[in-house]
Image (cartoon, helix red, strand yellow):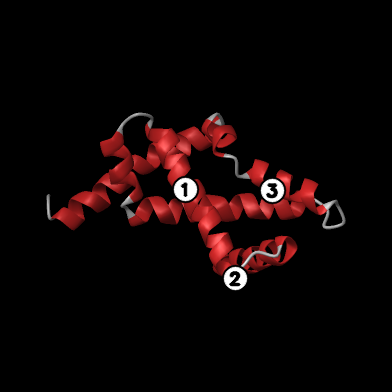
Amino acid sequence: MLKLVNTSNQQLIMALFDLTDFDYGQLVFNSGVAYANRMTGADDIGFEFLIKTMFYWSWWRSEWSARDAVFLDTYSAGADQSILYDNYLFQHNIYRLKDDSLMQRKAASIVGYCMDEYLKKEGVK
């Protein structure tokens, strides 16, 4: 059921801002890469490790979908398109998210899960 809600929210966002599947996917992906980079700071190894795990991307898409739902509940479709799009981008702004204490705790907790995935993939016990 959650997947259906997320899909329809994604479709609503795409229709609202005239985005293709590719455009929406690129926005989510590029933001995910930028967030991982900001989260890991200057640690290139940590960054590469993080963005190569399925767990990180699953988590990022889930968080993105949750923010899409909040956006759709908060803003009126009757608002000016440019202002609405700016508000949408603000909702997903990685600098704002990096400073959010709940998001920081969530991000810190995923590292262990990503490490487990990596070690299983590498055959390390």
Mark 1 against mark 2, which lies toward the viewer? 1
Residue 105 location (% of width, % of height)? 46, 34
Q: Secondary structure at mark 3?
A: helix
Residue type at the position of mark 3: Tyr
Looking at the image, residue 51 sits to the left or right of residue 61; the answer is: left
Cα distance between the residues tagged 1 and 3:
15 Å
Q: What residue do we see at 44% from left, 39% from top?
A: 107
Quadrant that contains the N terminus: bottom right
Residue 121 in view, yes or no: yes
Circle 3 residues within 10 Å: few <14, some 14–19, many ≥20: some
Residue type at the position of mark 2: Leu
Which residue in the protein does label 1 denote? 32
Q: Quadrant of residue 99?
A: top right
Against 63, residue 109 (above or below) is: above
Which residue in the protein does label 2 denote? 4
Against 24, residue 39 (above or below) is: above
Which residue in the protein does label 3 denote? 88
Residue 65 location (% of width, % of height)? 58, 56
Q: What residue do we see at 59% from left, 33% from top?
A: 96
Q: Earlier in the sequence, mark 1 or mark 2?
A: 2
Q: What residue do we see at 47% from left, 41% from top?
A: 35
Q: Earlier in the sequence, mark 2 or mark 3?
A: 2
Mark 1 vs 2: CB contact within 8 A: no
Residue 106 location (% of width, % of height)? 46, 39
Q: Secondary structure at mark 1?
A: helix
Looking at the image, residue 105 sits to the left or right of residue 53; the answer is: right
Q: Earlier in the sequence, mark 1 or mark 3?
A: 1
Mark 2 vs 3: CB contact within 8 A: no
Q: Quadrant of residue 91?
A: top right
Residue at far left of view: 124
